[in-house]
Image (spheres, grey):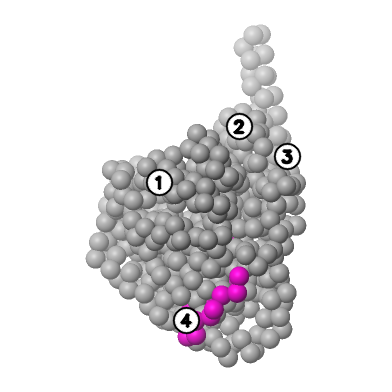
């Protein structure tokens, strides 16, 4: 009798768990792959699966989405509208009209991403050069310093940054920081205290007030941008932390890509920062458009044309992903990709397959070690698939590859925070610079060639010779791709 009651309770709980799982995953709009992935978690891990879902699966609140969507582009929408109306004239100015015009139109329509001219761009591939340049620009700031980072650690380089910002705040310079609380492993109040005491303002993204239930960390502000005086901007893959300088033995040399822009594209970056700031800050801290934030910048003729493009869970357009697909579809000779996480959805994978079958040379470079084991195993699975399609895949052996770069045909290149994975396409708040300039694209491709010297070209035989357990882990990890 007792045994029968036990099984009745178990069956009842499983039935309740099943109905609960169905109701939970269909409670908000999700794509089919994500629905099946979460059903797998909730059904195979009764009760525990719901706790995991609460941590990383629940959507960002409608209130926070509303706050983000109601922020305007600080005057740039009208410029974007005018550019859409005069696209034929703009196409005449593009150095590569055949490849670029459709991509420019796409971003003008989907993201109001203004096409800017006369941008001077410097590329950094190691943390020392990037932070030296950033610190020097901060030292020379005369009005404001705006930083937005996924990760700012309480370590040596993090404290060096805060010390410098504190000094500038004491000089009367406006200092504002937005950081992601999950990416930074907490709020680090002790580290920021001296900056706040000096007048700087530091806020965690969309978590301005203390909240007891801040465990929903699936939607992350993954952006990495810095704006100094509205004229100089930084965007790319480097966060702020000692590991990005190669000080962690686990990762060794940190290979990343970041760019410094001097030109009108910085005004678009400023607009992005102000939107995120105003969605996060208290009412009395909201910023308005002023000439100090959007100064007139002397254009440098003949230099790069740039669009700053953002995407995130506050918008269903998936602008950066669409940009990648448009680039892949328009490529005629070559596609190069560097990414630490290669977990494409079906659309991206199929677009790359079409490119390969059309005779385009597709090359991908991934790291040689995981920083997130499940994610890395899924990356290996999709790397094998890409090899089977006919692409070239390289494993970077010179340290940890964190670079997020795409280029095509020696003509167009993009650098930013977005990885080539579903998380960056759908779950994270990301920002990329899309650059229409043959010289810039050539520099990116030259860096890829240099990295190949420290890389191993992977083959199907490499995967066939690996252990059964590793193959199983790769296939199993792939099942969770939509929620990684």
Locate residue 348 relative to residue 470 in the image: left or right.
Answer: right
| The disc label shown at residue 80, or none | none
Residue topped by disc 3? 23
- Residue 296 shown in magenta: yes
Q: Quadrant of residue 196?
A: top right
Locate residue 256 relative to residue 304 in the image: left or right.
Answer: left
Disc 2 versus disc 3: distance between alpha carbons?
A: 15 Å
- Relative depth, front residue between 118 and 219: 118
- Relative depth, front residue between 290 and 89: 290
Q: Which tag, 2 or 1, sits closer to the chain's start?
A: 2
Residue topped by disc 2? 51
Q: Which tag, 4 or 1, sits closer to the chain's start?
A: 1
Q: What's the magenta region? A: 295-310
- Residue 357 shown in magenta: no
Locate residue 58 relative to residue 178 in the image: left or right.
Answer: right
Q: What percent of the width, then of the height, locates residue 338?
A: 40, 63
Q: Residue at x 49, y 71 (%)?
A: 262
Name the residue furthest left.
453
Q: Which tag, 2 or 3, sits closer to the chain's start?
A: 3
Q: Quadrant of residue 309?
A: bottom right
User: Can residue 436 be spotted in the picture?
Assistant: no
Residue topped by disc 1? 160
Q: Which circle, 2 or 3, is nearer the viewer?
A: 2
Q: Secondary structure at mark 1?
A: helix
Disc 2 versus disc 1: distance between alpha carbons?
A: 38 Å
Q: Residue at x 47, y 85 (%)?
A: 302
Q: Which tag, 3 or 1, sits closer to the chain's start?
A: 3
Q: Which circle, 4 or 1, is nearer the viewer?
A: 1
| The disc label shown at residue 303, or none | 4
Q: What percent of the width, then of the height, locates residue 438?
A: 43, 81
Q: Secondary structure at mark 2?
A: helix
């Amino acid at each position: 009798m007792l045994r029968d009651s036990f099984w009745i309770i178990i069956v009842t709980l499983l039935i309740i768990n099943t109905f609960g799982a169905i109701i939970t995953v269909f409670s908000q709009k999700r794509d089919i792959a994500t629905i099946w992935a979460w059903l797998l978690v909730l059904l195979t891990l009764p009760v525990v699966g719901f706790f995991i879902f609460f941590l990383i699966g629940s959507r960002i609140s409608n209130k926070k989405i509303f706050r983000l969507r109601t922020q305007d582009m600080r005057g740039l929408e009208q410029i974007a509208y005018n550019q859409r109306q005069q696209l034929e004239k703009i196409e005449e100015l593009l150095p590569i009209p055949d490849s670029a015009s459709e991509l420019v139109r796409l971003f003008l329509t989907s993201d109001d991403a203004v096409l800017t001219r006369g941008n001077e761009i410097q590329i950094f591939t190691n943390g020392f050069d990037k932070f030296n340049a950033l610190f020097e620009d901060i030292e020379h700031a005369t009005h404001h310093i705006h930083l937005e980072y996924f990760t700012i650690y309480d370590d040596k380089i993090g404290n060096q940054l805060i010390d410098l910002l504190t000094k500038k705040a004491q000089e009367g310079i406006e200092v504002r920081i937005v950081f992601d609380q999950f990416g930074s492993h907490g709020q680090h109040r002790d580290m920021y205290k001296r900056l706040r005491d000096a007048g700087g303002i530091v806020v965690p993204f969309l978590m301005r007030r203390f909240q007891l239930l801040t465990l929903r960390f699936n939607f992350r502000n993954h952006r990495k941008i810095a704006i100094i005086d509205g004229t100089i901007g930084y965007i790319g893959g480097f966060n702020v932390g000692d590991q990005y300088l190669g000080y962690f033995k686990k990762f060794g040399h940190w290979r990343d890509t970041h760019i410094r822009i001097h030109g009108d594209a910085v005004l678009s970056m400023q607009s992005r920062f102000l939107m995120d700031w105003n969605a996060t800050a208290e009412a009395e801290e909201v910023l308005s458009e002023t000439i100090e934030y959007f100064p007139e910048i002397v254009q440098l003729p003949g230099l790069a044309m740039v669009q700053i493009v953002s995407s995130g869970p506050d918008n269903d357009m998936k602008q950066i992903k669409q940009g990648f697909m448009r680039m892949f579809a328009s490529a005629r000779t070559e596609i190069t990709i560097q990414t630490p996480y290669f977990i494409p959805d079906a659309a991206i994978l199929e677009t790359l397959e079409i490119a390969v079958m059309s005779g385009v040379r597709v090359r991908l470079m991934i790291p040689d070690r995981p920083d997130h084991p499940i994610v890395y195993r899924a990356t290996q699975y999709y790397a094998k698939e890409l090899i089977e399609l006919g692409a070239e895949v390289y494993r970077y052996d010179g340290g940890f590859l964190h670079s997020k770069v795409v280029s095509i045909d020696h003509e167009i290149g993009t650098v930013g925070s977005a990885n080539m994975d579903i998380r960056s396409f759908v779950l994270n708040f990301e920002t990329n610079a899309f650059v229409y300039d043959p010289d810039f694209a050539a520099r990116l491709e030259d860096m890829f060639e240099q990295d190949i010297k420290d890389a191993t070209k992977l083959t199907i035989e490499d995967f066939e010779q690996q252990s059964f357990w590793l193959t199983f882990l790769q296939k199993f990890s792939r099942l969770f791709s939509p929620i990684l």
